[in-house]
Image (cartoon, rainbow, N blue to C red):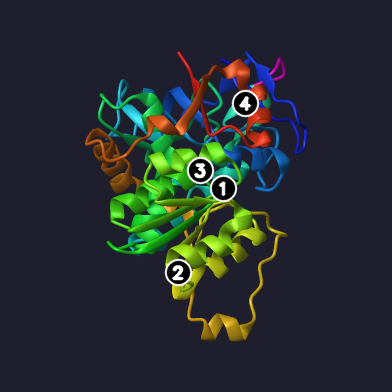
Amino acid sequence: MRAALVHAVGGGVLDIRDDVTLAPIGPDDVRVRMRATGVCHSDLSVMSGVLPQPMPIIPGHEGAGEVVEAGDHVTGLRPGDRVIISWTPPCGGCAMCLGGQPYLCVTFMGKVFSTPRFRFGGDAAPAYGMAGCGTWAEEIVVPWQGAIKIDPDVPYEVAALIGCAVTTGVGAVLNTAKVRPGATVAVIGCGGVGLSVVQGARLSGATTILAVDPLPAKRDLAVRLGATDVCAPGDLKETIATVTGGIGVDHAFEVVGTSATIRAAWKAARRGGDVIVVGAGAADDMFSLSAFNLLFEGKNLLSSVYGGADVRRDFPYLTRLWKAGRLDLESLISTRIELPDLNEAVTALQGGEALRQMVVLD
């Protein structure tokens, strides 16, 4: 089958191959034929080494497809089922899952680094899948807990977006921040996840939704999706003063993943407000606060991993919101491409202009 392979950190060009095979599925696994997969900044972070993963690796973690084979122990899925891939499968039995934080489950995490799911070349060299997925391939093998069944009438492209960008963004609003009607919100970074935060804030009834991004096109789209105000990063301080009367917002969402944007979100939040870190940053990019400010400003610094989601609940819930016309997911897709176009897609994403490029697989 075809897949896009990264041989080493910082290697640059993807190796688009047609000689990739899958390891046999285990009794608790499913094999999924990918139908759509997004190109996300986290994929670039794996290629650059910002998010450490074993090499060689097939990137991709945001996708949807069709089950083509199920292991002997799998009872809830069968060939033909339409599924969304979850890059953090909840085992259902660990302390995190039982304690209501399935997005922090690490039961399957060890296999990400120890079990290569792919083989390539004449010598069947091993390769790993990003976050245990590797959706930039025509087929993948994942634990059955990582394939969430959805209604067959949900388009694959919409389903793929729910697999990461939408769940991460909307979930940060509904699950992590628990934004209430009448709240004021700032969103720093208007990529696919940031625009999903904007939509989540609109769904929650926020009265002020300030979208911050250096690109006018992304700010314009943010307005279409629910933002009440927009500005470039350099104008954030002045705009916050204007739209909140100098108080600051109730909830400031950082959706870039840098210490600089976390600091900007901290400054944008009011005293006693929430600062929600959604962006995935580098391990050596340090953010610091004085002990005095941390206590006396009364602000809450929150992390939102995968939108604080329970994918078993939230994937179907988000598809229902889309069906009801409450979520505009099609507007998040800037370009539809094919698997051989991934190198150009990576270049476009690095340039900052692309929103969500969607790989469509027949």
Q: Nearer the viewer, residue 230 or 342?
A: 230
Q: Nearer the viewer, mark 1 or mark 2?
A: 1
Query: At which x and y percent is residue 79?
Result: 32, 22
Which residues are drawn in magenta?
120-124
Residue beneath disc 4: 345
Q: Residues within 10 Å of mark 1 (few under 14, many from 20)?
A: many
Instruction: Identify the residue position indicated by label 2 in the image.
Output: 274
Q: Secondary structure at mark 2?
A: strand
Amino acid type of the residue that numbered disc 2 sits on in the rendered structure: Asp
Q: Can residue 107 be found in the magenta stretch? A: no
Say above or below: 92 vs 2.
Answer: below
Can you say whether 313 is above or below 34 in the image?
Answer: below
Note whether residue 53 is visible.
yes
| Mark 3 or mark 2: whose residue is earlier in sequence | 3
CA–CA distance between discs 3 and 2?
A: 23 Å
Q: Mark 1 or mark 3, which is nearer the start of the sequence? A: 1
Is the C-beta separation of discs 1 and 4 under 8 Å?
no
Mark seen at residue 213? 1
